[in-house]
Structure formats: C-alpha cells, structure tokens
Amino acid sequence: MRAAIITFPGSNRDGDVARALRKAGAETVSVWHGENALPPGTDLAVLPGGFSYGDYLRCGAIAARSPAMDAVRAHAAGGGLVLGICNGFQMLCESGLLPGVLMRNAQLRFICRRQHLRVERNDTAFTSAYEAGQVIDVCVAHGEGNYVADPETIARLEGDGRVAFRYCDAHGEITDEANCNGSLNAIAGIWSPGFNVLGMMPHPENLIDPLIGGTDGAGLFASLCRAKADAA
Amino acid sequence: MKARVTVTLKNGVLDPQGKAIEGALKSLDIAGVNSVRQGKVFDIEIDAADADAARATLEQACERLLANTVIENYRVELV
C-alpha cells in the first residue's frame, strides 16, 4: 500500500495520518498541494485534517481548487482509493467528488471530544477489518461538520448504502444527543458511488495507539492495507 | 471596473449563524427583526472589455469558487 498524503497550507493532521498508515504497514509519501501529479504507484490519496487556507471563504473551498486536487480527481476517476478526513472531507464535498456540504455545527460550537461511530458496512476497502454494525470509539474535532444535502441526495446515499459511519452512543443507538453536530441522518462519513472515495469528519488516526487511550481507529488503516494486499 | 458579488444561502438551508445573530439582535431589543440570514459580499475590481464580459467572468468566478451552488445563490452587480 503506497499512500500519498497531500499537505495544504494549514493542514495539521498529515503527520498523524502518515503515522497511522505506516503503523498499519503502508508506505507513505508526502505531496505538496501545488504538485499536479501523484507519485507513481500511488494506491491511496489522503486529504488530511486541518484548517487549509485558514478555512477562508468556506472550509476546504480553496484547497479543493488546488493543482493536487486535479490529480486526486483523476486518481479517483481511475478507481484509485481516496480518503478525506475532517478538512479533507470538506475538500471532497467542495471539489464535487462527494455530494453535499458540511455546514457550521448545529450548536455553533467547535467540538473536540471522543465520539462513538457505527460502522455501517464492512464489505469495502476502508472497513473490512470491522464488523458491520460495530461501534467504534474515535475522536471528533471540528466546527463545520454538520452534513447537509438535498432530500434526493440523502435518499440516494441511503438507498445505495453509501453512508459509511453514523454518530451514535456507546450502544450503537442513533440519538439526538449522540449526533454531535446535527448532521442529517447522523451521517459522519460517506462513500462515492464506486466506494473508492471516503470522506469522514471523525479522526480515526487519533486512536491507533493504546498509549493515547484506544485503538479503534486502527481498523480503517488496516483495512486499506489489506485491500491492497488482496488486490495484489 | 468595480463589481460587487453577493453570496447568500438558498432558501430552506439552515443558517445557524444567522439564527444566532437574530437572537442577539432580539436580546438588544432591536424592534421588528423577524429573521436574519448571513451572507458574504465580495468587492472586486476587474479588467474587462465591457460590462457583459465582466459579468460573464464574474459569474464564472461564482460558479467555480465564490459560491457553493449546492447551498448558495449569488448575485453580480457592476457598480
């Protein structure tokens, strides 16, 4: 598994996601946002969390128009894997690679806390190391994570099984209290129609080391490395 | 040429910031405020052959960057 992690001005989780991927067995390459091609042999393009361009204009909007995003778009069009976390999810929505938009959190506050997620399915390159319906304990840290899309888009996402993760409580129940930012249908992450592009607000890369308090995030990176091994 | 581009949220899109401002205005006893929607204004200086060309360029700027047309409308005015 060769992962290209793209750094934008204001990205700050690129190092953490690289560490999580390497721990799972991947090779990581750092790519600057001004590059217009991904390194040869890239299996996975990663858009890390952070505050690209200081969240100016709209979160992820300016990063989504960078040269590297054209390369990411081409990579995705060829069936390549793309993972966008937090600010990366915002970029994927802004670039049109994923539908919908991430609005200001419903309660208007930046939230930074542990958060349970329900893994909706495990027959994908990103979630095979989990069980379908498994509840995982990761982190959220965002001010604009309130997923919104028009009713047709939501119906299509639900109908096609493209909701990857939902905010839930420790028992896997979807409740208003557990839906930390007010997202429609408690959506925390979605896939593209081909299931090769995943955008998610929570940070699995925070929870990969028992020293930090949990390892529930590690499964996502293990799944990606396994997907590459299975394909080889 | 000078232009003003106004970007506003589409009707029906929840605007928590506008709601908070509305609440703050009400708490200041500013009378008669029924609702507030927050938007953005861009004052742009642009070189163009004529007004139509400027308008066309600015519409492209809105479609490609200034507005997220999933949730926002835009208006271009030459001033």
Image (tube, coloured by chain):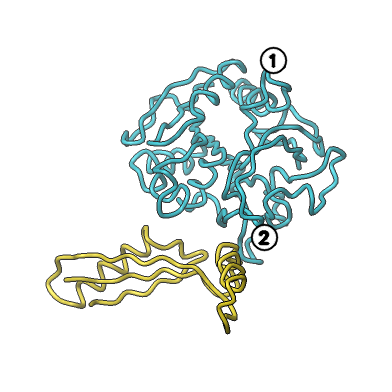
Chain colours: A cyan, B yellow
Q: Which residue is identified by label 2?
A: A154
Q: Are marks 2 and 1 on the same chain?
A: yes
Q: Position of residue A107 (x, y in %)?
A: 66, 55
Q: Nearer the viewer, residue B19 or A232?
A: B19
Q: Position of residue A96 (x, y in %)?
A: 48, 53
To which residue does mark 1 refer? A211
Residue A200 vs A96, above or below: the answer is above
**Mark toward the viewer: 2 or 1:** 1
Task: Name the chain letter of the residue that bears numbered label 2.
Answer: A
Q: Of marks 2 and 1, which one's residue comes earlier in the chain? A: 2
Most extreme residue toward the front, as rendered? B29
| Residue extending furthest toward the right | A171
Residue A62 against residue A119 in the figure, above or below: below
The residues tagged by marks 2 and 1 sit, at their Cα atoms, a distance apart of 38 Å
Disc ID at residue A63 = none
On the rendered structure, is A37 left or right of A83? left
Give, as a three-letter code, the residue at label 1.
Leu
Q: Quadrant of residue A204?
A: top right
Quarter assignment of residue A81: top right
* Residue in the image at 37% along x and 61% along y: B66
Residue A121 position, x and y percent, is 75, 40
Residue A38 % position (x, y): 38, 31
Which chain does tag 1 point to? A
Q: Could you say whether the residue bearing mark 1 is in a helix, strand or loop?
A: helix
For the C terminus of chain A, which image quadrant?
Answer: top right
